[in-house]
Image (cartoon, helix red, strand yellow):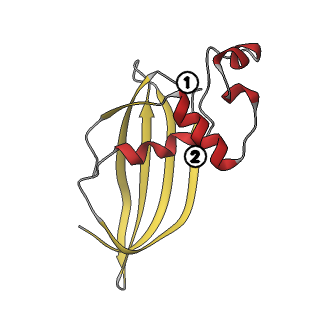
């Protein structure tokens, strides 16, 4: 199963909220000027931040309770920046049933405007079912 592609743009406020939440005080996330002082084009996204893309995505499937997030892996293939357009898609793989539980791998992919993969967020889930 796979979602439709969805365009996402992360902005400075998104980064500010995220770094405040995780307690990251790195100056590259504070302003474009500070980021440029450290050799970046503009404010980069923190490596795990693209996972918040889920808040803008609608999946055509519903995860049934209980939902247990067993493990997660974030892979940054390319540096990502604020105010750039990314295409997001979520795919479900490795789905199987055991007893009354469903086990699955759900992966968030983000691509840049050239179609190059920038980010993979892989979540291994155990849940009550999938509809």
> Which residue is found at the position 66% from the left and 22% from the top?
31
Q: Quadrant of the C terminus?
A: bottom left
Residue 75 appears in which quarter of the rendering? top right
Q: Is residue 84 above or below residue 94?
A: above
Image location of residue 42, percent across then percent down: 61, 17
> Which residue is found at the position 37% from the left and 56% from the top?
93
Lateral position of residue 60 relative to residue 100, left or right: left
State the SS at label 2: strand
Q: Which mark is residue 44?
A: none
Q: Residue under circle 2?
A: 74
Image location of residue 32, percent across then percent down: 64, 17
Q: Is residue 60 above or below residue 103?
A: above
State the SS at label 1: loop
Residue 108 appears in which quarter of the rendering? top left
Going from the N terminus, do you reach mark 1 or mark 2 first? 2
Q: Residue under circle 1?
A: 81
> Which residue is found at the position 73% from the left and 14% from the top?
39
């Amino acid at each position: 199963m796979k979602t439709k592609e969805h365009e996402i743009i992360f902005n400075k406020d998104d980064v500010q909220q995220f770094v405040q939440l995780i307690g990251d005080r790195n100056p590259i996330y504070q302003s474009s000027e500070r980021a440029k002082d450290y050799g970046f084009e503009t404010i980069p996204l923190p490596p795990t931040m693209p996972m918040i893309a889920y808040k803008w995505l609608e999946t055509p499937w519903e995860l049934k309770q209980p939902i247990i997030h067993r493990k997660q892996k974030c892979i940054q293939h390319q540096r990502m920046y604020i105010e750039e357009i990314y295409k997001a898609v979520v795919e479900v793989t490795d789905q199987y049933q055991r007893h009354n539980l469903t086990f699955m791998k759900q992966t968030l992919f983000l691509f840049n405007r050239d179609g190059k993969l920038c980010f993979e967020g892989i979540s291994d889930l155990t849940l009550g079912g999938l509809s």
